Amino acid sequence: MAKFIFVTGGVLSSLGKGITAASIGTLLEARGYKVIIKKFDPYLNLDPGTMSPFQHGEVYVTDDGAETDLDLGHYERFLNSSTTRDCNVTAGKIYYKVLEKERKGDYLGGTVQVIPHITDEVKNSIYSLSEEYDIVIVEIGGTVGDIESLPFLEAIRQIRFDLDENDVLYLHVTLVPYIKSAGELKTKPTQHSVKELREIGIQPDMLVCRSEYPLDDSIRKKIGLFCNVSKNAVINAIDASTIYQVPLLMNKEGAGRFILNKLGLEERELDLSVWEEIVYRIKNPEDTVTIGVVGKYVGLKDAYISLTESLIHGGIDNKVKVNIKWIDAEDLETQNPDKFLDDVDGILVPGGFGERGVEGKIRAVNFARNKDIPFFGICLGMQCAVIEFARNVLKYDDAHSTEFNPKTEHPVIDYMEEQKKIKKLGGTMRLGAYECKLTEGTRAYSAYKEETIFERHRHRLEFNNKFRDELVKAGLIISGVNPERDLVEIIELKSHRWFVGCQFHPEFKSKPTKPHPLFSGFINAAYKFSQDKSSIQESEK
Ligand code: GLN
């Protein structure tokens, strides 16, 4: 049976509980322990799949096709272990299970209640996977004090008594704000948040205190005293310039050692050199490239978190800093694209749903194709590339995706057959990892350097094979195909410096320790393009 670390959050949201969980996971994994992280979300949706990115940020997809919270993306980027659908559980999922059991008659004669039925189901879910790992880290979504998260907190409270004392560690993430007018760091919000936790029966073993400035010894002592923990259980998580520095900072604070000690696990040799190298690369780039990302949710960075991180990873691999220029696709519909795209070294059109901004994305593709600017289209971005090509090369003016124009005579992107019958929206897309065979001699092949790859999907529509021959004849390259169903997965352009569109989401598989080949290839092309541009400017002087 694994050891358990429960991560709760206090004071306010967005304190980086996910990054904290991922970072302590990293410190334990780097010592050779097998670690997995799970997230429990207190809302009632079965999963975030039907929520707008404006509500919930990005929907992260696992290999086994679950639509999950974006924190799972952090877990996978930091750890070697892959998350599965068991790693993200919402209150809705728990209630659904309990109600299904009730209808089956499993509780016959009993009154079904939050305690013990809901809490038991939460505990079952926490214990699943515990045979396969040494340590299971469980992050509880929301902030302590929310009504919604109470059943989860009650379940983790009970676990202290179900298991041995050294099998369980409670870690609470809080904020120690700096108050300018007083010129001081304040501990009161932390004290109150821990008090709230203790009122429901949980005494944290360890506090991770976020702060803008370092906590000195006297503040640590004070927090320890008022929160009933030892001084060395107060870990200071000072604001870092890159999230990948957090494991290193937490290590310096002694977080890993403290956890091992509390859980009765042996200290082992620790090697964090890969993380040191990553942070060094991020802080010491040799050059900068600017990537224009043309999307619909650009005002909300959480909506593109895996994408942003993958671009950073591509930068690490090429020793450059990636500067992202966020461009609202709708602006390209009404204004000259030159104004937005003139200075970029690469254009990326990410995935998306709904018609708003689509014409702007198609214009961005057109700009990249005509001006020979490196282009990367992901999911809807790839679909836009196919539409643009059909409209402007094949001259099918009305070419479109049936998602946006169901009556078009040239539906170059169309619903998959099985999707046409689907009535329920939740969990019914083409989801998760599928095989893709690459064609030798293509950009995709030279990026991956292998013939068979597996990539994660989240979409309903596909490249329409009815138009495949025509498009290929006109210069479109099909460089990746799903062998099972002959679905087009990657497209490229013959006479272009780097133009790649993929139907899957490569951003879900990129890690700083293993940058995704397509992101590395794209950044490499953008870097070369920026160098070509500057040598032309030099010679024109
Ligand atoms: N809306 C498109 C589809 O469902 C693209 C989805 C996406 O970009 N993830 O096929």
Image (spheres, rainbow, N blue to C red):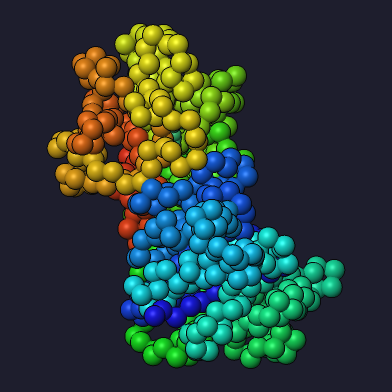
Q: Where's the N terminus, which quadrant?
A: bottom left
In front of the other: 113 or 479: 113
Q: Write down the quadrant of residue 6 in the picture.
A: bottom right
In front of the other: 171 or 390: 171
Question: At which x and y percent is residue 420?
Answer: 40, 25
Compared across the picture, whether 185 is left or right of 350 comes to: right
Compared across the picture, whether 130 is left or right of 468 comes to: right
Examine the rendering and report whether any part of residue 210 can be seen: no
In front of the other: 72 or 376: 72
Q: Quarter of the picture for ligand 1?
A: top left
Question: Residue at (44%, 30%) from the top-left corner?
Answer: 422
Question: Residue at (54%, 53%) from the top-left corner?
Answer: 103
Q: Tell me: residue 161, above or below residue 326.
A: below
Compared across the picture, whether 179 is left or right of 490 comes to: right
Question: Residue at (56%, 33%) from the top-left corner?
Answer: 296
Question: At which x and y percent is residue 106?
Answer: 50, 62
